[in-house]
Amino acid sequence: MDIAALRSANPEHWNKAAAIRALTLDAIHAANSGHSGMPMGMADVATVLFEKHLKFDASAPLWHDRDRFILSAGHGSMLIYSLLYLVGDKQVTLDQIKNFRQKGALTAGHPENFLIDAVETTTGPLGQGIANSVGFAMAEEIQRARYGKKVVDHHTYVIAGDGCLMEGVSQEAIGLAGRHELGKLIVLWDNNNITIDGTVELSDRTDQVMRFKASGWHVQEIDGHNPVEIDEAIAAAKKSKKPSMIACKTHIALGHAAQDTSKGHGALTNEEQMAEAKALYGWTTGPFEVPADIKAAWEAIGSRGAAEHAAWNERFATLPQNKQAEFTRAYDLDAPKKLAATIKAFKKQITESAPKVATRKSSEMTLEVVNPIMQETVGGSADLTGSNNTKTGDMGVFDIDNRAGRYIYWGIREHGMSSAMNGMALHGGIRPYGGTFMCFTDYARPAMRLAALMKVPTVFVMTHDSIGLGEDGPTHQPVEHLAISRSTPNTYVFRPADTVETAESWEVALTSKTTPSVLALSRQNLPTVRLEHKTKNLSAQGGYVLADADGKRQVILMATGSEVEIALQAREMLQSEGIGTRVVSMPCMELFAEQDESYRKRVLPGGPVRVAIEAGVRMGWDRWLLGERGRENKADFVGMDSFGASAPAEELYAHFDITAEATVAKVKALLGL
Ligand SMILES: Cc1ncc(C[n+]2csc(CCOP(=O)(O)OP(=O)(O)O)c2C)c(N)n1
Ligand SMILES: [Mg+2]
């Protein structure tokens, strides 16, 4: 690379981009870890994007109509931190840059949305950012259709590396964006042909340009170090009605001894080589020092959008009051006032009619009353709409000619759907929920974990939640999935027993602001077990006494979902023999754990023997079985310790001994009877 030629061709541009490169080298040297090469390679693209195109106001990073900038190649975090410091972001100060990757710093190893307002989404797991971006772009379309171009009109820009494009989820995302003609989505591919193990050819010969074209994208190929080409390509991308990919040919670790090699991917901390690179850049100031004129030029970029922001505020103020309130309420994730009363009325009606339906149907019945009063919900399914029961009558289908549609046919793309739902939630104004089979939480898992980490209240509607799905057999029968979901921090896992509990679970999920929810729902019909109307949301306490013991309490049975019916049958049998038995329904262990100790002790007092019944693995139950200190109670478990099998559901329950009789036998053994 002829750095001297690049410098002299456009010195002003060069110096701005060199500031990113120098800060990257200094911060990574100080941290003695990080990824230098990517920010050094993409500095030119990012500089032109921020200088000429990105609509943002550095003083107001949460302005609703800002363009979204997503660093999908999250390992290159020093790129976004440098940019934010340079444009004058209030959070990313020079001190933060100096403390890159240190305890307590906002400048974490990978960009975290919950630490820095201007970081739109947490990235690092490659491919997530580009998949989130599809949700961001869909959310923008939906909000624009709803509120009009004068208040919603922005682009979503993504920087993605070879790794993001190699990850399978990228194809799910690209296919969706192409199909839906998300013209305001622009992906800048850091085409440096380098990954950690070597060159891309080691493991891939995909023609990315042809792949994007085949999926319905507008594609351009440019020199990623030529500011004029970068500017023109972004301008052309903005004009395209299709989503755009710009293949930016770049040199990883530009100007460094490690340029164009996989050594350039990681931390470049050799001081001599750093000095050589800086000399090539014409960078003469000391570590972390950006010359005042260059910093001023960057700050001017940071305030470029202030006037546009002010004009937007004025336009927003011209919306009718109720529209403004609705817009703000949805962004603030406040539930509509009517929600609580709607759920209560629905519960009352269910308690009276006591339907025997699958909880996936209960979920649909709940959504039928909720969606019309909660316009911010956007539903969907990964090609299982009729099985997940996620679509309600009022939603309309999101499509090229119906951007206001609130139902999305995600196709067979559980991972892409889940990541895109996170993107919608992060964009704001929308509460996404989407369905697949519980067993395929495996396919959605990377995004489910990130929803929890990022603190977004995405709702995962997971039906066919046990061997109770029957004939489809063990490939489709979740066994370990409840435990996996429950083991994830900041995740509510609901397994409601009937329609009342399902409605209560939805109420918690739809009022949560920082915690995602997993709804594990049955395929098979279940009786209504909540036959006494309670206005209080009992499921919000996680576990509660559903039926108390008659006489001396000798036994506590705990169960979730479809096994609550079995617990109630076992209770009848035990009571008929004079054995006092309490049944505790436990729709959400995490919420039960959040209750104060006195409540937990009231529901689960010490003394009686305990048996839990759940058609899944035991893992996760011992705290409630053995006691919070792990040894206070005699206890046993009725559930699964192998994969399921293909047969009608009732036969499977008998075969795997998940029955009232098996429960009674275990209770009697514990009581020494
Ligand atoms: C899902 C996932 N797998 C693996 C990694 C570890 N990893 C971080 S960067 C990287 C290589 C990425 O290559 P590329 O995107 O081309 O980045 P560049 O080397 O060009 O900076 C890998 C494998 C990761 N962060 N996420
Ligand atoms: Mg690369």
Image (cartoon, rainbow, N blue to C red):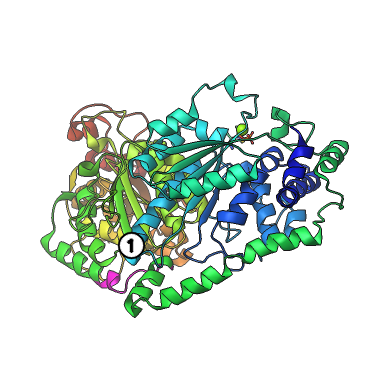
> Callout 1: 10 Å neighbours few (<14), some, many (20+)?
many
Is residue 603 depicted above or below 36 in this figure? below
Point out residue 128 in the picture as x, y percentages from the top left corner.
50, 42
| Number of numbered discs visible in the structure rendering | 1
* Front one among 424 and 528: 424
Corner quadrant of residue 197:
top right
| Residue 8 percent across, percent down from the top left | 77, 44
Is residue 211 found inside the magenta-colored segment of the image?
no
Q: Is mark 1 within 8 Å of ligand 1?
A: no
Measuring 16% from the left and 50% from the top, which residue is drawn there?
357
Q: Judging from the image, what secondary structure is the residue with disc 1 in? A: loop
Give the quarter the ligand 2 occupies.
Answer: top right
Left or right of 50: which side holds 482?
A: left
- Give the amino acid type for the residue marked by disc 1 in the picture: Glu
Whether residue 268 is visible here, answered yes or no, is no
Instruction: Magenta stretch: give its range.
Output: 332-341
Q: Is residue 367 left or right of residue 247?
A: left
Quadrant location, the C terminus: top left
In the image: residue 88, left or right of residue 504: right
Query: What residue is at 49 percent from the left and 56 percent from the top?
Result: 455
Screen quadrant of the N terminus:
top right
Query: Closer to the camera, 351 or 146?
Result: 146
Secondary structure of the magenta portion, mostly?
Answer: loop
Q: Which residue is mark 1?
A: 376
Residue at 75% in and 60% down: 295
